Amino acid sequence: MSNRRPGVGVMGAGNGASAEAMRLADQLGECISARGWVLLTGGRPAGVMAAASRGALRVGGHLVVGVLPNEGNGDDRQRTADLDLALFAGMGKARNVINVLSADVVVVCGGGGPGTASEAAHALNGGRPLVLLAVPALWRDFFCSLSEGVEIASDVQECCRLIEARLTEA
């Protein structure tokens, strides 16, 4: 049996994330770390990624990993969210697949743009449990139409209960 800590991917808008999505992401990052899970994000210093990382870092024993789109050369190497580990994929938006497939459960926090939508779709395609936290009705309706297994959460505590249930099933 592996001693590997479960990883929870938190996806959402970067630039342009709503204040509510960032508040929820901050709380979610803290909740994830408090349960001893690894937080996995897109690693950029913006929006949901940065907020989830900030929340997770407040908890002792945290492990915050970001998969970044660039190669980490020059100044880009320091342009990250606050992370324990920055992984520079050098793949641009294709790094979304790495983010999702490296997570045991994927959470979309507050919706987002095409990148976030692609991460949700990759989660379903890759057989990863998908939890939608406070997403717009259009997102909920669309992703639920693609899979009966999509979970819906309206607050962080409910989201963490759903994550825990999905991790226990695995």
Image: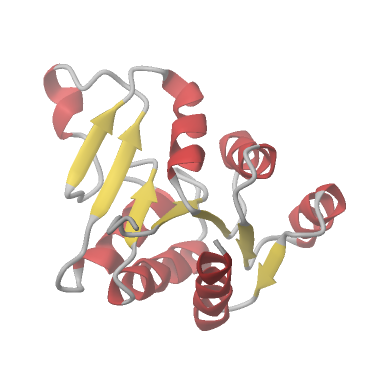
Query: Which residue lies at the image location 64% right of the left edge and 76% below the top edge?
Result: 154
Whole-percent x, y for residue 41 in the image: 38, 47
Q: State which quadrant residue 152 falls in.
A: bottom right
Q: Nearer the viewer, residue 77 or 96?
A: 96
Whole-percent x, y for residue 144 in the image: 81, 56
Q: Is residue 71 left or right of residue 69?
A: left
Query: Which residue lies at the image location 49% right of the left edge and 75% below the top edge?
Result: 160
Q: Is residue 1 above or below residue 96?
A: below
Q: State which quadrant residue 155 falls in.
A: bottom right
Q: Which of 2 and 16 is in front in this view?
A: 2
Quadrant of the frame with the C terminus = bottom right
Q: State which quadrant residue 5 falls in.
A: bottom left
Quadrant of the frame with the N terminus = bottom left
Q: Is residue 53 left or right of residue 83?
A: right
Query: Which residue lies at the image location 58% right of the left edge and 42% below the top edge?
Result: 116
Whole-percent x, y for residue 127 in the image: 64, 45
Q: Which of 132 and 25 is in front in this view?
A: 132
Q: In this view, does 94 lie above or below 14?
A: above
